[in-house]
Amino acid sequence: QVQLVESGGGLVQAGGSLTLACAVSGSIFTGSIFSINAMGWHRQAPGKQRELVASIDSGARTNYADSAKGRFTMSRDNAKNLVYLQMKSLKPEDTAIYYCSSGYRSDTYYPRYWGQGTQVTVSS
């Protein structure tokens, strides 16, 4: 079982930066097939579907949604059981609840466990 707790959300002006953190309890990366081998950050804006923003696997290989490329950086600290999402050049359209997840990634990322989310609001 994996438990995830996000932090770091808040209100920021457009063009500003914010770093989200996700504290993970339980095994992050077991490395075996069909097990947990990746983490993800997702977001859900009001009235919209939840979307995957970024994911990172046990080899620290990252994938990003087009909307996040060049502005967001996902990283992990296995020793501290933390994953991060550094966000810069924020836009009002980045406003959403951001969720951390853990799951399995091959060609596609499949989330299995979710955090409760943290609100990010970008003012214009």
Image: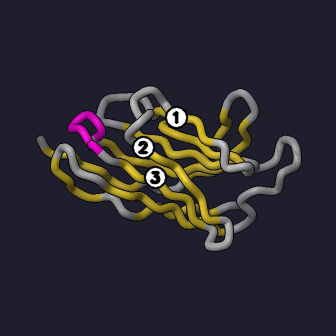
Under mark 2, the amino acid is Phe
Which of the pair 118/55 is nearer the observer? 55
Pointer 2 or 3: first along the chain: 2
Q: Is residue 20 left or right of residue 78?
A: left
Q: Is residue 51 left or right of residue 38?
A: left
**In the image, residue 46 above or below residue 122:** above
What residue is disc 3 on?
Answer: 85
Q: Amino acid at mark 1?
A: Tyr
**Proximity of marks 1 and 2: CB atoms separated by less than 8 Å:** yes
- Mark closest to the chain's N terminus, 3 or 1: 1
Residue type at mark 3: give it. Answer: Leu
Whole-number angstrom distance, CA of label 1 to CA of label 2: 8 Å
Q: Residue at x 32, y 42 (%)?
A: 96
Assign a secondary structure to mark 1: strand
Q: Position of residue 23 (x, y in %)?
A: 55, 66
Which residue does the numbered mark 1 point to in the structure image?
Answer: 64
The magenta segment:
89-94
Residue that badge 2 annotates: 72
Is residue 92 inside the magenta stretch? yes
**Residue drawn at (27%, 43%) of the image:** 89
Residue 91 in which image quadrant: top left
Disc 3 + disc 1, Cβ < 8 Å: no
Instruction: Judge whether residue 81 is colored magenta.
Output: no
- In the displayed orientation, state which residue is furthest to the bottom: 80
